[in-house]
Amino acid sequence: MRIIKLHDLYFKPFILKEELAQIVKMLVKQVKADLPEGEVPLFVGILNGCFLFAADFIREFDDNCEISFVKLASYEGIKSKANVKQLVGINEDLSGRTVIILEDIIDTGATLQEIYNIFRDKDVKELKVATLFFKPDVFKKELPIDYIGKSIEDKFIVGYGLDYNGLGRNKSEIYQLTIKPKMKNIVLFGPPGVGKGTQADLLKEKYNLIHISTGDVFRYNIKNKTELGLLAKTYMNDGNLVPDEVTINMLKKEVEKNIDSNGFIFDGFPRTESQAIALDTFLAEKGEKINGMVALEVPESLLIERLLERGLTSGRADDTDVKKIRNRFNEYNTKTAILKGFYQEKGNYYGIDGVGSIKDVNNSLSEVFDTL
Ligand code: IMP
Ligand code: MG
């Protein structure tokens, strides 16, 4: 299911193209059935919302007809305004005509009432109303609505001509207002060289997440000689962890930059319990949380092999020296593995066998990601 964001609000798919086409077809059939033989109706579309509906309607109608549009705005944002103001557009002589108003949606009925009154005074032969959507729970008028495409609950919708503050009209399907989707925030965990980066790249594509690799963030900052970068450099080259405060501030910045995303894969962070607590606090402020820690588990001997191999091409100072590598494992084992307990206590820890092909490991990870 694809959720869209318009301005500050989120909308989920509600009525698909095929159903819309069916509704229009059904409406046309009913309208035609009531028209006297040879009658050329004048359809009057209420702009702006009806333009797609009206276009599809008259094409489906196919027989001789005229179409004209009037404009009458009653909505600002998602709330109906009590009184409707101006009508622009009708110049035709309407006397003796069969006029059929085409509305996109009738909500309180205020808009329609206004228009109805104007047309009633124009000496028409017959005045009818066809609306694509109707909200029976909020309709307050006594007006006859001759043709209703679909009655819907009182929830704001957009698409197929309907808008939210100007946006959404060009969608070919109808979307309904929904709550902001929760993020999927996952800590990808495991010792150096376990393949976190590779897997994170695959997972971020698949789940449309932002991958925040502490290592990448640091290397970027170091390369660009930022203040935090220069500070971090001294620690990293020795295979030590960068102090929490520096790390947390860098990571917060990355999260803030992508606060509208589906979620994050944290890779290389948190590494200490105090980082984990800081992250929880930070996410809680946003109404979000860590959905789970997913840990890749691989035997240490295999990892050392992998790291030395990577050091040959990566040029990373901390990848070339066995002593430095062991130092990183020590760091990992003494400090970071504590996190396993931290997340386990919350029932949030998921261990995954990291030995195997990239695809196999990815499949195992996906099985867990799907549930988080
Ligand atoms: P009413 O005057 O309250 O019946 O509102 C009618 C007009 O309000 C429609 O022609 C639309 O322009 C707008 N409107 C009502 N409900 C919705 C909705 O759910 N989405 C988008 N526009 C709406
Ligand atoms: Mg309208």
Image: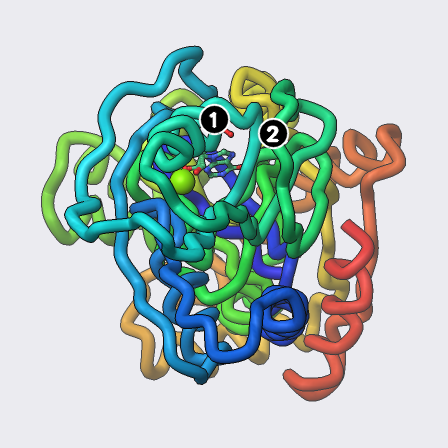
* Kind of residue sitting beneath label 2: Leu
Q: Is residue 31 visible?
A: yes
| Viewer-side residue, 145 vs 339 | 145
Q: Are marks 2 and 1 in contact (CB under 8 Å)?
A: yes
Q: Position of residue 358 (x, y in %)?
A: 64, 83
Look at mark 2 in the image and give the residue it sits on: 143
Look at mark 1 in the image and give the residue it sits on: 113
Colour scheme = rainbow
Q: Quadrant of residue 271?
A: top right
* Kind of residue sitting beneath label 1: Gln
| Viewer-side residue, 55 vs 357 | 55
Residue visible at 55% across and 20% down in the picture: 278
Residue visible at 36% across and 61% down in the picture: 42
> Image quadrant of ligand 2?
top left
Residue visible at 53% across and 22% down in the picture: 286
The relative height of residue 250 versus residue 195 in the rendered view (above or below) is above
